[in-house]
Amino acid sequence: MTQTMDRPGTTGSPAERTDAWLAEFQAALTDRDVDRAAGLFAPTSFWRDLVSFSWNITTVEAPDGVRDLLTATLDSTDPTGFRTTEEPTEADGVITAWLAFETAVGRGRGLLRLVDGKAFTLLTSLSELAGHEEPLSERRPAGAEHGVQRDRQTWAERRRAETEELGRTRQPYVVVVGGGQGGIALGARLRQLDVPHVVVDRHPRPGDQWRNRYKSLCLHDPVWYDHLPYLDFPPNWPVFSPKDKIADWLEMYVRVMEVTYWGASTVTRAAYHEDVGEWTVTVERDGGEVTLRPQHLVMATGVSGKPNVPVFPGQDRFLGDQHHSSRHPGPDAYRGKQAVVIGSNNSAHDIAAALWEHGAEVTMVQRSSTHVVRSDSLMELGLGDLYSERALAAGMTTDKADLLFASLPYRFLPEVQKPVYDAIRERDADYYRRLEEAGFWLDFGEDGSGLFLKYLRRGSGYYIDVGASELVANGDVRLAHGTVRELTEHAVVLEGGTELPADLVVYATGYGPMNGWVADLVSPEVADRVGRVWGLGSGTAKDPGPWEGELRNMWKPTRQEGLWFHGGNLHQSRHYSLFLALQLKARQVGIPTPVHGLPEVQHRS
Ligand SMILES: Cc1cc2nc3c(=O)[nH]c(=O)nc-3n(C[C@H](O)[C@H](O)[C@H](O)COP(=O)(O)OP(=O)(O)OC[C@H]3O[C@@H](n4cnc5c(N)ncnc54)[C@H](O)[C@@H]3O)c2cc1C
């Protein structure tokens, strides 16, 4: 009892206890007393840092991990001013406190969870660099320059001049390969931070990535989760944006955010020159070749960008249409035809449903189990507290939701998610029973942690049900199981001999890892040096261990100087583009960026 009383932060209101903990933490940091600071963390505890201490995205665990992090970073970070920014709250014995602090080079925000006077989780994140703040709100540009000026240039003239110079007479500091939502969000951040950049995409227009996908596609994530940096969707925007509508939004966004965007331009190769710390990036553009010489190259080529196209005997003699889901034109040409969709995840279901709606006879081939979750249930139980009209009404902002989400360490996330999926399983028990009775192989992830963990671990293996599961449950879309042995002139033949007559075969077989792009554009050696991209090292299917604690290589330094990866869903593109942009800005202006905790490469592909 006395011991508890003595420990900082164990008596008083949540605010008093938080203040006591923060005072002790700050004092230990100021004294450079790493052991004392580490002792303020519970034996099971996590400190996730987004760039503010580590110049990395990293999570350390337990007092030992805290000691390591601080030993390496405390002097250079020189953190000061840890304080709460609003009244801490307490629920179920956990105090949650929003924080602000300063470092030697910038300002940070964070979130602390205290249990019994010790830190259970701490999130620290860099939000801006001192002296390089974004020109937002009270710092916004005047636009008009009042007074008189000889040879005044208008905004449009300055924009035109920049477009003409950049990449020709003036080199960009950053080249972003890929101008989907990821490249675009990063481009917008770089613009605000005044980092000369060019976002290069092989498609003619921003948004074409979405326009070219199968025509029935609507976003599976809701609008509150999908905002881009600086510019929220308006309140009349649909909850699930049709693909062509999101494409138009991206195109508009590029213009109004003044992203330097080269459409119809393909990066064909890139090489890094250690001696000068510079890339040469070859771009095919306007029928010729342009060479760019940036210091940094960001691969924003899409986590779902490199199609996995399977090779089966007999594909050459098959007389119908066959294509990967990324090339599926839509159902119109297949009325009355027999379609076989290989795969049972999101694209497979969306495409199968659209084909059925247009009068095709559809068979879905399931090779392994799939996690299925009804969109309504996911929105209500999975995302509703953070990203919904309900969340907004309760005072939740996108910014806070993003930080709250980020404050849950990946190691601990399954424990948060499992009860959600238990509740979904119970609520939709009848639905899941019908699917299983129809022969559909279901799972909830190997540890029952559901969709988001599957997404983080392997980026595949699930369907957010927006209607197709009913077709599977009632038999309108037929199911077959197994692996494909071969194609004949008119059929898909499975191992075991089942023959599925087909006029159309869609390979909804997913996408390959982003390091494949590096092998293609830079070299297989550099791809190997950098290693696998995405996944947590959870030791579950398609995400081999050891445990990494963070998504491999995403938004943080890699083992190749000057090479970065960006992307993910709209939420991740929005949130993590800030940290990537700050890392790039710091390097541009010569702020020292000693990286702590760069992981060893465990897997080459
Ligand atoms: C069917 C489907 C549905 C999805 N639904 C959602 C959803 O609801 N919500 C969500 O957030 N995410 C969704 N995703 C996942 C993901 O968010 C999207 O794939 C999204 O488009 C990723 O954005 P990105 O910018 O990272 O990559 P992409 O949009 O794939 O953009 C990458 C770009 O890189 C370009 N590129 C590649 N190589 C080169 C080169 N050498 N030179 C020039 N350009 C190059 C490509 O042309 C492409 O435009 C979905 C994905 C798919 C496939």
Image: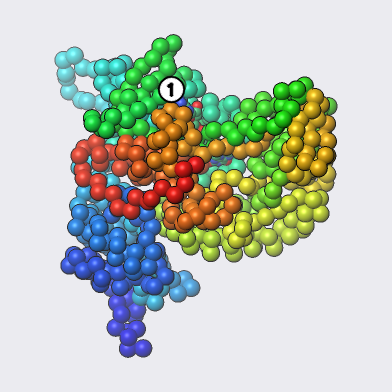
Q: Quadrant of the N terminus?
A: bottom left
Determine whether 215 is above or below 226 in the image.
Answer: above
In the rendered image, residue 118, in percent from the top left (x then y), is placed at: 36, 73
Q: Is residue 101 left or right of residue 312?
A: left
In the rendered image, residue 116, in percent from the top left (x then y), is placed at: 39, 77
Q: Is residue 597 left or right of residue 523?
A: left
Determine whether 73 is above or below 276 in the image.
Answer: below
Q: In the rendered image, which residue does mark 1 sit on? A: 268
Q: Is residue 566 left or right of residue 434?
A: left
Q: Is residue 352 visible?
A: no
Furthest-bottom residue in view? 2
- What residue lies at 40% left-to-right and 11% top-to-bottom? 288
Amino acid carrying label 1: it is: Thr
- What residue lies at 40% left-to-right and 20% top-to-bottom? 283
Does the closest atom of ligand 1 sit within 8 Å of the Cβ of label 1? yes
Disc 1 is placed on an element classified as strand
At label 1, counting other C-alpha atoms closer than 10 Å, the crowd grade (few under 14, some 14-19, many 20 or more) is: few
Determine whether 542 is above or below 413 in the image.
Answer: above
- What residue lies at 33% left-to-right and 67% top-to-bottom? 64
Q: Is residue 1 left or right of residue 506?
A: left
Of 600 and 322, nearer the camera is 600
In the rendered image, residue 111, in percent from the top left (x then y), is placed at: 37, 60
Of 477 and 13, nearer the camera is 477
- What residue lies at 24% left-to-right and 67% top-to-bottom? 34
In the rendered image, residue 532, in percent from the top left (x then y), is placed at: 46, 43
Residue 292 position by quadrant: top left
Determine whether 571 is above or below 292 in the image.
Answer: below
